[in-house]
């Protein structure tokens, strides 16, 4: 429906109020209910797309008309229209700050979403209406604070009620206990005291056993710790022995290699060129050049016309100088193997 100006709306609502005042109701009050229903129909009348009067008034900035409609029962949360826009959505979209504040003061909902699935706050932020967005945010925070205070007050009241009930039950229990003890015979009282003494003795014995068990566990833990230290010491000893044995084996192998590579004639380690007989026995170049060197000193094989060099042994000798170098080369080879 088209919303007229402020005076026309006020006249319509005022005329309906005068009609209600001049009308004499029936005994059951059905006429008063009919008049209220007629006035609410005017307030809730919808246009072609489902907007009510208050929705249109908020969209067009009619602040006074919005107040009059709210006073006459208009729903500030109505969004039964095609766009699902509430009056707050319309006021935010049109940028009417005063109407937004008025609707917030009338406790309108701020969590309603329109057809685009956005709230009034999101709409204000999206359209760049910062002041309106701040007003909605402040209202949300104040409402949340109020709800928290109400919830806190409710919990405090419940806790007070619970404590009062507990005290009442405790008082009743004490009274019943005192009355019951007064009714007990001397024999029953003596039996009760005997039972209490027995339980105390059992408690003392249990405490002694518990202390002994804790001491036993402590001693066992110390023994386990000592055993672990012994194991670590033995492991270190084994590793040290293994290392010493390896070094000794390497030294023995080096000594054997050095003895094996000595020239059988001059008993010196060859230097420079190294020759060998057809059977593989080696000797140095100086001994090979001797005139009397016609046969191998090891296997007696003839060396006439034989000039075989052992380049592998020459390479080993070139890697290290003297017996120390040869021993180092052989020990490295054995270690790598």
Image (tube, helix red, strand yellow):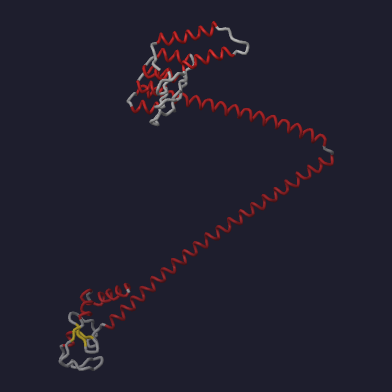
Pick out the residue farthest to the top: 22
Q: Quadrant of the N terminus?
A: top left
| Left or right side of 248 for 33 | right
Q: What residue appears at the point 28 percent right and 74 percent down from the top-left corner?
A: 328
Res 135 → quadrant: top left
The answer to whether 231 is drawn above or below residue 286 in the figure is above
Return the x and y of residue 279 as percentages of the image width and height.
24, 89
Q: Is 219 located above or below residue 61 in the figure?
A: below
Count the numbered circles shown: 0
Snapshot quadrant of residue 218: bottom right
- Residue 31 location in percent, x, y? 57, 12
Left or right: where 248 falls relative to 313: right
Residue 282 or 78: which is nearer the viewer? Answer: 78
Q: Could you tell me residue 316's position as x and y percent? A: 23, 77
Q: Residue 152 appears at what percent x and percent y?
A: 54, 28
Residue drawn at point x = 53 percent, y = 25 percent: 150
Q: Nearer the viewer, residue 168 or 155?
A: 155
User: Which residue ends up furthest to the front in the rendered image?
Assistant: 48
Q: Quadrant of the C terminus?
A: bottom left
Front residue of this view, candidates 155 and 294: 155
Residue at left 84%, top 41%? 187
Residue 3 found in image quarter? top left
Residue 326, relative to residue 301: is it above or below? above
């Amino acid at each position: 429906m088209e919303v007229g100006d402020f005076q026309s709306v006020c006249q319509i609502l005022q005329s309906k109020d005068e009609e209600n005042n001049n009308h004499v109701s029936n005994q059951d009050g059905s006429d008063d209910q009919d008049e209220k229903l007629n006035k609410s129909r005017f307030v809730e009348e919808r246009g072609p797309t489902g907007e009510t009067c208050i929705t249109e008034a908020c969209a067009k900035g009619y602040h006074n008309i919005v107040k009059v409609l709210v006073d006459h029962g208009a729903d500030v949360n109505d969004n039964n229209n095609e766009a699902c826009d509430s009056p707050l959505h319309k006021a935010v979209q049109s940028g009417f700050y005063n109407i937004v504040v008025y609707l917030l003061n009338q406790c309108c909902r701020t969590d309603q979403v329109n057809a685009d699935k956005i709230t009034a706050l999101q709409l204000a932020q999206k359209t760049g209406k910062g002041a309106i967005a701040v007003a909605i945010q402040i209202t949300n925070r104040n409402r949340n604070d109020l709800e928290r205070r109400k919830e806190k007050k409710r919990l405090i009241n419940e806790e007070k009620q619970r404590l009062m009930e507990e005290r009442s039950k405790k008082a009743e229990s004490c009274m019943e206990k005192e009355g019951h003890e007064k009714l007990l015979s001397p024999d029953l009282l003596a039996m009760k005291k005997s039972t209490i003494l027995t339980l105390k003795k059992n408690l003392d014995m249990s405490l002694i056993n518990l202390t002994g068990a804790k001491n036993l566990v402590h001693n066992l833990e110390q023994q386990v710790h000592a055993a672990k230290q012994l194991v670590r010491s033995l492991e270190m000893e084994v590793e040290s022995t293994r290392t010493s044995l390896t070094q000794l084996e390497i030294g023995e192998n080096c000594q054997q290699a050095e003895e094996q590579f000595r020239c059988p004639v001059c008993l010196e380690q060859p230097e420079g060129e190294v020759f060998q007989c057809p059977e593989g026995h080696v000797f140095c170049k100086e001994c090979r050049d001797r005139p009397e060197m016609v046969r191998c000193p090891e296997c007696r094989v003839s060396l006439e016309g034989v000039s075989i060099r052992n380049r592998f042994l020459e390479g080993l000798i070139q890697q290290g100088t003297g017996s120390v170098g040869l021993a180092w080369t052989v020990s490295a080879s054995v270690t790598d193997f």
